[in-house]
Amino acid sequence: MKRILIMLLAGVLLVTTYFACAHTVALPTYPDSPQNRDGMFRNDTPRQEFGAWKKLSLWWTFFFGKNGDTTPSQDIPVVELTRQQLLDAPDNSLYRLGHSTILLKLGGRFWLTDPVFCLRASPVQWAGPRRFHAPPIAVADLPPIEGVLLSHNHYDHLDREAIAALADKTGTFLAPLGVGEQLIAWGVDPAKVRQLDWWQSTQVADIVFVATPAQHFSGRGMGDTDKTLWTSWAILADGMRVFFSADSGYFQGFAAIGERFGPFDITLLESGAYNVQWPLVHMQPEETLQAHRDLRGRWLVPIHNGTFDLAFHPWQEPLERMSTLAGEHGVLLSTPRMGERIDMAAPHAGGPWWREAR
């Protein structure tokens, strides 16, 4: 009976994904990229591949086998923001808007990472991981954005509706190879899109952005796995250096990035949606701490948690484990509430807000 149910579930998911992603963008093969081989992007260390039955078992567990603690039982505390508050905020301000969506004010301008404002991180909005909290500010209420930084095309990092809302109010979209083609297909002015390979850099206003390596994968539907690149970002402003990991397993690339561009004042590092069954695409908290050290970071802000249920661990576990580890190892950790301002020049530790919403 269990196998029959798994097969039925898989069929529903496949049909849903097919129709949601039927209009896949035709992408170049990027033969000049060292990361692209035989039309697909690769990690330096190949990730593990699951067989069909293993994938179906994981899907079954994801939808039907979780404990109730993977989502909060109470509302998450959120600091609501207004456009005027943001315009009046001093330079070097940072706001966590959810998951991996970070709003930075640097050089008097606003920069946004992986903007996801949708209800669900899914091909459809009637099914899939649902937000734990509303965004601190609606995408329509954001001030003009100088640049949007995109890391890869997974649904919890690339939100089509948010891109459409940002298209006219954003000066530049920075994306890894292939992701820019998706933006253009969605109606973004090609003149606003810059696509980068690993280690390539570009300057917008007075800030240099470097597309740095990551250990992950890509895909939005059937047939486009690893057809676009994934990346992290080094943000090099006058007197301020910020690292945005997006999604990555732990790898030696963090040390290489730290050697080239560190030390970083702030590291925005993923800690969430991890599992021992997929070690090469997401980091355990101990690995996040090590990545911060490799990057020669000063303050660590854990991201990729607190918004979507994307794994099997308790929803607050990443923040709790990071808090414990940082205390044990003397690492400066900041855990702001969603929407709470951080002064990047003099961060504060925040507090254990996740304990309020168990």
Image: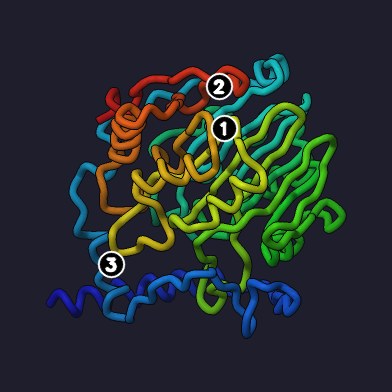
In the depicted view, which residue is nearer to us: 76 or 99?
A: 99
Give the numbered dot on residue 342: 2
Task: Check contact, mark 2 vs mark 1: CB within 8 A.
Answer: yes
Whichever of labels 2 and 1 marks the residue nearer the N terminus, that label is 1
Whichever of labels 3 and 2 marks the residue nearer the N terminus, that label is 3
Q: Secondary structure at mark 1?
A: strand
View extreme (bottom): residue: 38
For the residues marked 2 and 1, what is the alpha-carbon distance in whole angstroms? Answer: 11 Å
Q: Secondary structure at mark 3?
A: helix
Q: Name the side, left or right, on which 277 lies relative to 335.
A: left
Q: Quadrant of residue 31?
A: bottom right
Report the amino acid beneath label 1: Ile
For disc 2, the neighbor class at 10 Å (few under 14, some 14 to 19, many from 20) is many
Task: Check contact, mark 3 vs mark 2: CB within 8 A.
Answer: no
Q: Which residue is mark 3?
A: 58
Q: Secondary structure at mark 2?
A: strand
Residue 146 vs 129, above or below: the answer is above
> What percent of the width, then of the height, locates residue 92?
67, 23
Give the numbered dot on residue 114: none
Residue 65 appears in the figure = yes
Which residue occupies 43% across, 71% down? Answer: 47
Q: Quadrant of the N terminus?
A: bottom left
Report the amino acid beneath label 2: Ile
Residue 94 vs 18, above or below: the answer is above
Residue 186 appears in the figure = no
Which residue occupies 41% across, 55% down? Answer: 282
Task: Check contact, mark 1 vs mark 3: CB within 8 A.
Answer: no
